[in-house]
Image: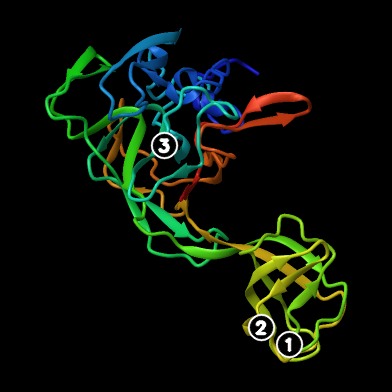
Amino acid sequence: MALWGISTTTETAANNYNIPKFMHIVDKNVTGHNVFADGRGWIHRHYKSSENSGISTRYCDEILVPIAGLNTTGISSNTTGLGNATPVAVFFEDPNKASSISVGGGGTTGIATNTTGHVHLVYNELVYVSAGATVRIRTFDANNANESTAIVGTAASVAPGAPVVNYVNGNGLTVFTNFNGQITNRVAFAFTSPSTLLTANVTFLSTNATQAIGAGTTNIWVNSVSNVSVGSSVSVPSGAGPGGILNAPVVAVGNTFVQIGSASTVNTLFASNNLVTFSTRTNATKLFIDMDRGFIGVGTDGATGVGIISSFTSDLIRQVGGAGTYLSVQNDRVTSVGLGTTTLTVR
């Protein structure tokens, strides 16, 4: 397989949307998400600040692979020209904006309440996106359930009068000072995390009762009490009778049993080997990029001026273990699987 592509024939997710494959996502400054096609060829944008997106005005461009007319429409599918810009990734920016993309490298999967964060939408060519374009962010509790009020992420504009330099076909390097939006391959949508958190009981242990649990019993004998502590919650589904114990606070922990308060007991008999679950009351809100909605707003291709693709597909998801922290090990080979994540937890 070629190290980079030059036509729409190979512009697929499996081929990394033609982006040069020697760009490794191990540092956000040398990631393929900062590589795009313009009239000069494949360009690597080196940002000179922690902000790697269209709201930054401090960067320099390096021509990685000179290919004249790479961002134009080829005469046929096998000739040079990628045509209109193609979306290649969407994810939450690492709130820490850490440089090292590695486990323990400073990235995070969490963000504080009432804090500004960003969703990044990446294309393989330069695009013009007007200020006010939006993405939708869904909110769930720590169990990924009980969906709550959605959040809107909005594309901002660079500071008025700030110079933005980009290559324009036929004109060469051009300075823009009055475009109300972003001229970039990496569009940033700003949002504010919720000021209050959703609450849910998150199960961390499922085990079984080792003795029958009689009506009014405060001791529950179980196979395991691993990680159970005072303050954990215990639940016992309905046994031989109606009702059950639901999220009763644990007041004491023994080697093979837990104790609940008398107010939490029920007038029900539970058979031995009945399922018993333990959970922790968790205050957290999980944010998910709404992949079905895509983005809403005005966006045009940097070369042709036609509207760009605004829908999201599963190929764009960068669903990794942490925003900029996760490496995958497959067949004894460590490979990066994406910069950022499509899930972010507000704590």
Left or right: where 270 falls relative to 343: right
The label number, if any, that marks residue 50 in the structure image: none
The quarter of the displayed image where residue 244 is located: bottom right
How crowded pointer 2 is (Cα within 10 Å; few <14, some 14-19, many 20+) is rated as: few
Which numbered mark, 2 or 3, is in the foreground of this view?
Answer: 2
* Residue depicted at x 42% and y 65%: 148
The label number, if any, that marks residue 262 in the structure image: 2
The quarter of the displayed image where residue 119 is located: top left
Depth order, front residue of 3/250:
250
Depth order, front residue of 143/312:
143
Q: Quadrant of the N terminus?
A: top right
Residue 71, given in percent of the width and then of the height, sits at 38, 21
* Residue depicted at x 39% and y 31%: 84
* Residue depicted at x 68% and y 75%: 260
Q: What residue is disc 1 on?
A: 216
Mark 2–mark 3 contact, CB under 8 Å?
no
